[in-house]
Every structure is written in structure tokens, then in C-alpha cells.
Amino acid sequence: MLPIGATLIAALSVSSALGLPGRQTITPLPSIEVTAPRDVTSVKGLNDALSALSKKATECVKAGGKPETCQCSDPQDLSSLRRGYESLIKEHPDWKDQLVTYQYVNQEGRNISGTLVLQNLRRQLEALKCQ
């Protein structure tokens, strides 16, 4: 099992020139642009929590820990991530399994764009069995 936050990118191409029967074209997830300041703060906070937890799990694995153990080594941050996800989906049920994009201005005054694939996050949280 990959550490939480690990991303698997699969490149799939379907060419009608190949004439492969039964092949379907892949439809990308629709993107929801988050613009309300409160929602941007929520999505950014969720993404930050995921990044922090992923960093800690990665450091644990690099130090020789087992991925299964390292994913669960910070129960407080994991619990915070779960609560943040559940709260966001409760407030915006139509965002479940969607790709959300957001922008904010950082402390240096730079415009930063972010993307969070809520479907991947949900799957990772569901697969994560900490005891």
C-alpha cells in the first residue's frame, strides 16, 4: 500500500485507428472551481493537512518504517484530515468524488493555484485501516 497522499498516474490512450472493440474513451472528472473565501480556506486546509500527513508518512518510511505502520503513525493528524474531509463533503455533498480547484494569495503576495481530487482522497481514507 502506498503512503497516503501518494499519487498514481496512469496514462491511457485509446486510438480509434487501432480498431479495438469494446474500448471506451476516458472522460476526465469535471472540475469545480472553488471561489468563495470560506470554501477556499476549507479546501486549502484539507490539502495542507493531506500534505503534512503525507510528508510525515514518507519520512517514516525513509527512516525504515513499514508503510502500513507509517501511514497510521500520526493519529491526531489523520483524525483531523478525516474530520476536514467529512465536514467539506457534508457542507458540499455535490463535491464528493470531484476535482476541485482553488486560488489564493500566499504570504509573499503570489497567486497560488491548487487542485484536490476528492475521489482519490476518499479512497485513500477508506483504504486506510489504522488500529
Image (cartoon, helix red, strand yellow):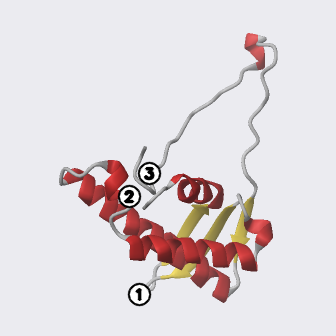
**Separation of residues labelled 1 and 3 (CA atoms):** 27 Å
**Circle 3 sits on which residue?**
6
Above-or-below relation of 28 to 121? above
Q: What residue sits 52% from the left and 41% below the top?
A: 9
Q: Earlier in the sequence, mark 2 or mark 1?
A: 2
Q: What residue sits 45% from the left and 70% below the top?
A: 78
Q: What residue sits 66% from the left and 65% below the top?
A: 100
Q: Looking at the picture, tell me which residue is in the foreground, 12 or 90.
A: 90
Q: Earlier in the sequence, mark 1 or mark 3?
A: 3
**Circle 2 sits on which residue?**
71
Number of residues whose C-alpha sits closer than 10 Å to that of mark 1, classed few (under 14), some (14–19) or many (20 or more): few
- Residue 69, position in %: x, y? 33, 55
**Circle 1 sits on which residue?**
107
Check disc 1 and report its element: helix, strand or loop: loop
Q: Earlier in the sequence, mark 2 or mark 3?
A: 3
Check disc 3 and report its element: helix, strand or loop: loop
**Separation of residues labelled 2 and 3 (CA atoms):** 11 Å
Q: Nearer the viewer, mark 1 or mark 3?
A: 3
